[in-house]
Image: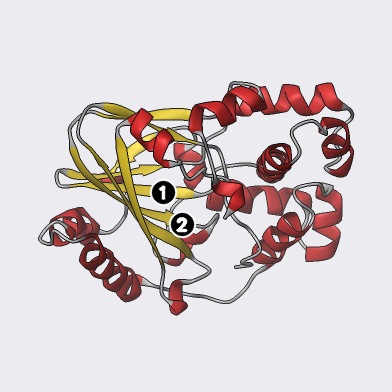
Amino acid sequence: MNNLYRPFQPVLTEVGLKRFGLSLEHSPACETLRNIVHSYLQISTVKQTPYPVIPDGTQAVFISSRGSLIGGAQSHACDIPLLQPGDYFGIWFYPGALRHFFDLNLSEITDQYVDHQYFPCRKFSQLHNYIYQHQNFQQRAQVCEQWLLQQLNPGLATPFDEALSLIYQSLGNVKINELATRTGWSSRHLNRSFRCHTGLSTKQFSQTIRIQHAGKQLYITPNDTLRTAADLGFYDQAHLLNDYKRRLLTNPSNFFNRFMSDFYNN
């Protein structure tokens, strides 16, 4: 897995966290899992509140004291309703990384959230009990990490991994036939692999990565949409802004105002 990719999930400022009634802790994965698991996180809330999720091609598993949910790839921004006060632990996987632990076809759950029964692993249904035997976030992360290490099947690098790397390096602005030529797989085979391992077609995944980089650039230089559009291969400013609104459901200014994000200053 190529570690050039930094998923576009905004880290809320203190003001933004208070707006949503949330507090957040996060921790990176160990060296063995570094390019498979992006991080562990824990969201705590004192009231019923929405938790915003941004389309980024990744998969996340959300674990409460009552059970687990897995989120398929999201094609547009959405809110997960946190209905009860308390802690919500999470595992944030890089795109395509769940295949190192489970035999899944993620195209089945695109734009969906499903419970632990989706996983072909009986032990997973009890993971939330092991995690919530501990009160401290770091201890919970350690329990989760040890469980993942026991299930890990690293496997060998494939043309799918090479295609991921090429998409990241091009900021999502790469033609599918070029990916096929450079990886040695047909466009159809690549597409099947992307649908299975990410829940998105090769084109959809590339477009998701591209709009993420557009979001980053528009945060840094909000008045330079023309250059951002040209750099990332959009036809023009209107094409960029329309795609942004279609995936994030608002324009860049409103998006950043909502989250009060300092993600790109880190």
Figure quadrant of the N terminus: bottom right
Residue topped by disc 1: 60
- Check whether the beta carbons of the residues at disc 2 and disc 1 lie within 8 A of each other: yes
Q: Is residue 231 above or below residue 34?
A: above
The label shown at residue 93 is: 2
For the point 45% across and 66% down, the residue is 100
The front one of 66 and 212 is 212
Quick one: label 2 or label 1, which is nearer the N terminus? Answer: 1
Q: Counting other residues with Cα less than 10 Å from the Cα at mark 2, is it few (<14), some (14-19), or many (20 or more)?
A: many
Cα separation between marks 2 and 1: 6 Å
What's the residue type where badge 2 is placed? Phe
Q: Residue 86: image x %, image y %? A: 18, 40
Q: Could you tell me which secondary element the residue under label 1 belongs to? A: strand
In this picture, residue 230 sits left or right of residue 156 = right
Task: Inspect this view and state whether residue 184 appears.
Answer: no
- Which quadrant of the structure image shows residue 124? bottom left
The label shown at residue 174 is: none
Q: Residue 29: image x %, image y %? A: 41, 69
